[in-house]
């Protein structure tokens, strides 16, 4: 029976004890290093986000990345902070999603507000005093396994916005320690002071900041932020762009390629058809054409799989992310 490179890679993982391979005090070299650079285009995924229903600690995320043969990722900041020993995050509102008005979270009780404030204060104090050594160790752990952390994402709701200047500097310190080439954050619409702060710090560090938009994406959304600083850029989500009803995706990428930090890759129906997330190749997002444009023009920014369509019966998010990777490989 003939085995593919992926088969050999997975068998190598299965044959070795994960606890030993991924222990913090033993840097792991993968039996077969992952490779998701196709025709010069780096393909990765946003993690842990794309691995729905999977453990979200840094060791488990690394196993998922190498199992899916992905040699790059955009890492969410809380995953790195957990590895570095951050205190527990603030407790969520009671009742969970859907318990409050209009499908939001239920209101916090006075005791919950106090607990959240105490947890936030402890986390802030930790952030402003922690050594970068553990983040550097995490970078080495991933690099030894053949995975580059090419972007650090400040996950929405888990990092303050606006932030104090020391917290801003901490975020960039963390990104630098992890080896990230850019910092990513949700677009703070209506808060130009945030993009001004991040753009100024990015200019000091010579590190781009990519702002991610959802259905608020438009051809002019990023103009004011980019005018504030040459280090303010675009984390373009091509699925959201289509679902928002915007035309000219390929032309927008051509016009702004120098300010794009990464592309988030997904397939969505257009606005007229409801904008639904669907398996790649079934929607209106020209994913293959975008990848081929990146390849033809040798754009340096990565393509980041953001897995969001419903997991089909009998499958898992791990398998579906692998299918998205295969889609990219075939396109390129």
Image (cartoon, helix red, strand yellow):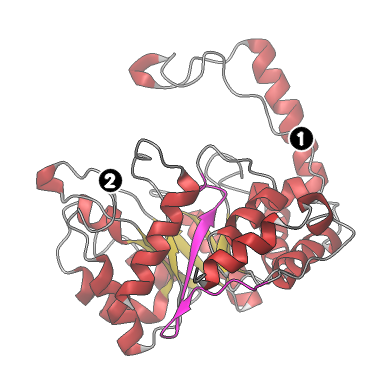
Q: Is residue 32 visible?
A: yes
- Looking at the image, is mark 2 or mark 1 earlier in the sequence? 1
Q: Residue 11 placed where, x, y %?
A: 63, 61
Magenta stretch? 32-51
> What residue is shown at x 44% (from left), y 60% (from top)?
211
> What residue is shown at x 68% (from left), y 55% (from top)?
14
Disc 2: which residue: 277
Residue lying at the far right in this picture: please name it: 25
* SS at mark 1 in the image: helix
* SS at mark 2 in the image: loop
Q: Residue 200 placed where, x, y %?
A: 57, 69
What's the mark number on residue 236? Answer: none
Disc 1: which residue: 121
Residue lying at the far bottom in this picture: please name it: 297
Marks 2,1: beta carbons within 8 A: no
Corner quadrant of residue 57: top right
Pick whichever, 251 or 28, lies toward us: 28
Asked if the magenta segment contains residue 43, the reply would be yes
- Please indicate whether residue 1 sits to the left or right of residue 243 in the image: right
Give the number of marks. 2
- Please indicate whether residue 230 sits to the left or right of residue 151 in the image: left
Report the quarter where the C terminus lies.
bottom left
Q: Residue 317 placed where, x, y %?
A: 46, 45
Q: Is residue 50 visible?
A: no
Asked if the magenta segment contains residue 230, the reply would be no
Q: Residue 283 placed where, x, y %?
A: 19, 53
Q: Is residue 90 above or below residue 185?
A: above
Pick whichever, 77 or 325, lies toward us: 325
Residue lying at the far front in this picture: please name it: 1
């Amino acid at each position: 029976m003939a085995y593919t490179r992926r088969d050999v890679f997975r068998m190598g993982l299965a044959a070795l004890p994960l606890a030993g391979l991924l222990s913090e005090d033993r840097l792991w070299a993968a039996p077969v290093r992952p490779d998701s650079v196709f025709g010069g285009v780096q393909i990765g995924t946003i993690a842990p986000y794309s691995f729905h229903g999977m453990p979200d600690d840094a060791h488990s995320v690394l196993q998922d990345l190498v199992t899916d043969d992905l040699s790059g990722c955009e890492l969410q900041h809380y995953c790195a902070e957990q590895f570095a020993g951050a205190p527990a995050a603030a407790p969520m509102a009671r009742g969970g999603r859907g318990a409050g008005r209009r499908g939001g979270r239920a209101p916090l009780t006075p005791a919950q507000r106090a607990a959240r404030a105490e947890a936030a204060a402890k986390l802030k104090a930790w952030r402003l005093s922690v050594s970068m050594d553990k983040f550097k160790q995490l970078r080495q752990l991933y690099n030894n396994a053949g995975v580059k952390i090419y972007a650090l994402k400040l996950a929405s709701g888990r990092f303050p916005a606006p932030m104090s200047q020391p917290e801003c500097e901490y975020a960039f310190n963390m990104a630098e320690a992890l080896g990230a080439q850019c910092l990513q954050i949700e677009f703070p619409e209506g808060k130009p002071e945030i993009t001004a702060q991040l753009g100024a710090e990015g200019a000091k560090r010579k590190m781009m900041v990519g702002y991610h938009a959802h259905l608020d994406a438009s051809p002019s959304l990023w103009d004011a932020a980019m005018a504030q600083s040459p280090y303010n850029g675009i984390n373009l989500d091509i699925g959201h762009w289509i679902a928002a009803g915007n035309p000219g995706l390929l032309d927008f990428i051509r016009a702004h390629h120098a300010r794009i930090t990464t592309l988030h890759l997904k397939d969505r129906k257009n606005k007229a058809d409801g904008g639904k997330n669907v398996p790649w190749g079934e929607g209106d997002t020209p994913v293959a054409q975008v990848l081929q444009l990146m390849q033809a023009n040798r754009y340096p920014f990565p393509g980041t799989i953001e897995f969001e369509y419903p997991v089909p019966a009998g499958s898992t998010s791990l398998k579906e992310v692998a299918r998205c990777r295969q889609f990219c490989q075939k396109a390129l």
